[in-house]
Amino acid sequence: MEDDGVPEGVSRLEGRPVGGWGLLQIAGCTGLTAYSVWAFILMPGFRRVPLKLQVPYMPASAKQVANVMTLLGGRSGKMVDLGSGDGRIVLAAAQCGFNPAIGYELNPWLVRLSYFHAWRARYLAKVSYRREDLWKVKLNDCQNVALFLAPSVLSLLESKLLSELSDDARVVSGRFPLPTWTPSTVLGDGTDRTWAYDVKTVRQALESEQQSSAGP
Ligand SMILES: C[S@@+](CC[C@H](N)C(=O)[O-])C[C@H]1O[C@@H](n2cnc3c(N)ncnc32)[C@H](O)[C@@H]1O
């Protein structure tokens, strides 16, 4: 007779070792589920992006968004968020008067979510979310750039920004600083810390560093 409260199926399994084949099946199913979530929900559209350049979605906090807007305060013109997630920074920029305000995002679910948020805020006509690879976007006519990316990609991004942005551009980086650039302003503490870089000042600092390292 079986113990009260123990389902029949479970009691039949009790005491039976899970063999090698069973373990293999469990591992296979777990791996397949994890891969499916990664490929179809978290990182769809990233197949052509090298693994070391893939940055997962982690939305900016309200404080981080506010810091970006403060650091872009008093500026105007085109604003882009490289890897725009659910579009919150672009939406805030449009609400602060930046025109155009554009987000580049490879994940199609997040692009749809961004448009939903813009529609709900009645800003649909003032924002644009493009399903494009940020590494392939030309930034020559951008005056204001926001990025919340991972340290692993920031060094490569420095080179891209330096070769494409004009002197009057400002770059605002959240969570992590650009590795070799000198910031003009730093705002906030801990994970809310946000760095602003004026491209003209960065170019001048890099040039004088090169000159001093070249010697007399
Ligand atoms: C850490 S999240 C930041 C999201 C948003 N900027 C924010 O702060 O709320 C980085 C985003 O960049 C996107 N991303 C990563 N690599 C990308 C690429 N090569 N092209 C376009 N988007 C990319 C990811 O899908 C993710 O949504």
Image (cartoon, rainbow, N blue to C red):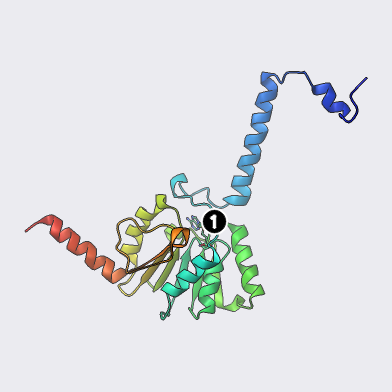
Residue at image position (18%, 59%) is 210
Residue 118's image quarter? bottom right
Quadrant that contains the C terminus: bottom left
Residue drawn at x 25%, y 66% is 203
* Side of 134 where 9 appears, left or right: right
Q: In the rendering, at what x and y percent does residue 211 appear?
A: 14, 60
**Disc 1 residue type (three-letter):** Met
Q: Which residue is mark 1?
A: 58
Question: How would you rate the neighbour count of disc 1 (Cα within 10 Å): few for under 14, some for 14-19, many for 20 or more?
Answer: few
- 204 with respect to 153 (left or right): left
Residue 87 place in picture, x, y as percent: 56, 66
Is 109 placed above or below 171 here?
above
Give the residue displayed 32% in from the left and 65% down from the top. 183
Quadrant into which the N terminus falls: top right
Q: Residue furthest left?
A: 216
Q: Is 119 above or below relative to 58?
A: below
Work out whether residue 77 or residue 1 is closer to the camera in this orientation and state it: 1
Does the rendering let one see residue 138?
no
Label 1 within 8 A of ligand 1 by Cβ: yes
Q: Position of residue 68 (x, y in %)?
A: 46, 69
Q: Secondary structure at mark 1?
A: loop
Classify residue 162 as left or right of residue 46.
Answer: left
| Looking at the image, residue 195 lies above or below residue 54 | below
Frontmost residue, 138 versus 209? 209
Q: Quadrant of residue 7?
A: top right
Residue appearing at x 39%, y 73% in the figure: 141
Describe residue 147's horizontal placement relative to residue 203 as left or right.
right
Please tell me whether residue 184 is drawn above or below residue 4 in the rendered image.
Answer: below
Q: Where in the figure is residue 161, as x and y percent of width and height?
A: 35, 63
